[in-house]
Image (tube, rainbow, N blue to C red):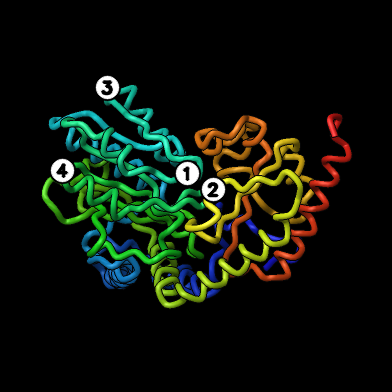
Amino acid sequence: MNRDFVYLDYAATTPADPRVIDAMQSCMGAGGTFANPASVHIAGRKSAAIVADARQKVATLLGTEPGRLIWTSGATESNNLAIRGAAMARANRGKHLISMPTEHKAVADTFRALAREGFDVTWVRPDEYGVLDIDELAAAIREDTQLVSVMHVNNETGAIQDIRAIGDLCRARDVLFHTDAAQSAGKLELDLNDLPVDLLSLTGHKFYGPQGVGVLYIADRPHCNVLPIMFGGGQEKRIRPGTLPAHLIAGLGTAATLAFAEHDQDLRHVSALGNRMWAGIADIEGLQRNGPAEGGYPGILNVGIADIEGESLMLAMEPVCVASGSACNSTSGEPSYVLRALGRSDMEAQSAVRFSFGRMASEGDIDIAIERYRFAVDHCRSISPVS
């Protein structure tokens, strides 16, 4: 890793694994497998074989068949295609949709756009730890409900939702269930041949693959389909157009194979790092843990101190790289809407810092982060006018 900084922001993006980079480089340049996979000549057929191989690798990771997977540019596009595409495909059956206020903006803003277009959206709130009560969801489902979207692992708090229970409920009510698995795919076990999930979004850069490529899974069951939201070529079953980037897809396929093979050691590693981080700061006066202390994804630790502002903490922590919320919202200066939905005050949410851990992080990185966080807390308190 780069020694100019200590990187503990793996929930925002992960560095590409060197083995992923090797796979991508084999597809680039005049000597590589760079051709358009849709071309019928020999170079195109070689690229198409790379794409087919990667599709099988991702299918193996997810426990499904390769024909159920659509290539996209990432989880944001996958979420938009799943939610908007499914809502439009089933609009003649009803226009009621359900999600949570703690979803990633790629989900929440898609639902808000649909609401402006005449759909009725219900936002089911989680408990104080970010976990959805299945009875609350059951009570929100109506005769005209067509889609429920609940993320598997929350990107800010690490809260894990029971997607099996949610999916079982949706199947019983003939409602499609979509889950944003950007933070769980490649990190937690997923078996889509067993799980009652209809639509699932993922992106490569959250588990050591390249940025700019993702997948949408569409289950093979009646009335489970999406309408396209972009138009052009018919590359991906006429659902998603565009020339397929063979190098990015090859990288994602390799990342999927590595995640499948190294799942147990990756999970043990981030669990150990998360426990070490928490043990090193838990005794700080006024520290509050945002999200579940147990049962959440161990690679994410979100903490806050109500009398300290989070951005100042982050600056005082340099060269340790952490986040004050999701990366897409970190420059707005607004308190985390996710934490406010969990009942945190604006000041409590503003103070939040998210540590997230990954394959390339070390115990030494954690020890530096502990030292810098404790220093930053003391420093910010020493200069605070109310301290």
Q: Earlier in the sequence, mark 3 or mark 4?
A: 3
Label 3, label 1: how far apart the Cα atoms are: 28 Å
Q: Earlier in the sequence, mark 3 or mark 2?
A: 3
Find residue 291 and name its label. 2
Asked whether the residues under the numbered discs 2 and 1 touch, taking CB atoms below 8 Å apart as contact, a structural biologist would say: yes
Q: Amino acid at mark 4?
A: Asp
The percent position of residue 10, horizontal first and vertical second, equals 57, 58
Cα–Cα gap, marks 2 and 1: 6 Å
Q: Residue at x 63, y 54 (%)?
A: 355
Is residue 259 shown to the viewer in this render? yes
Residues under numbered marks 3 and 2 in contact, where contact means CB atoms less than 8 Å apart: no
* Mark 2 Cα shell of 10 Å, populated few (<14), some (14-19), many (≥20): many
Which residue is found at the position 24% from the left and 30% from the top?
96
Disc 3, disc 4: CB below 8 Å?
A: no
SS state under label 3 = loop
> In whole angstroms, how far apart are the C-alphas of marks 3 and 2?
34 Å
The crowd level at tag 1 (other Cα within 10 Å; few <14, some 14-19, many 20+) is many
Circles 3, 1 touching at the beta carbon (< 8 Å): no
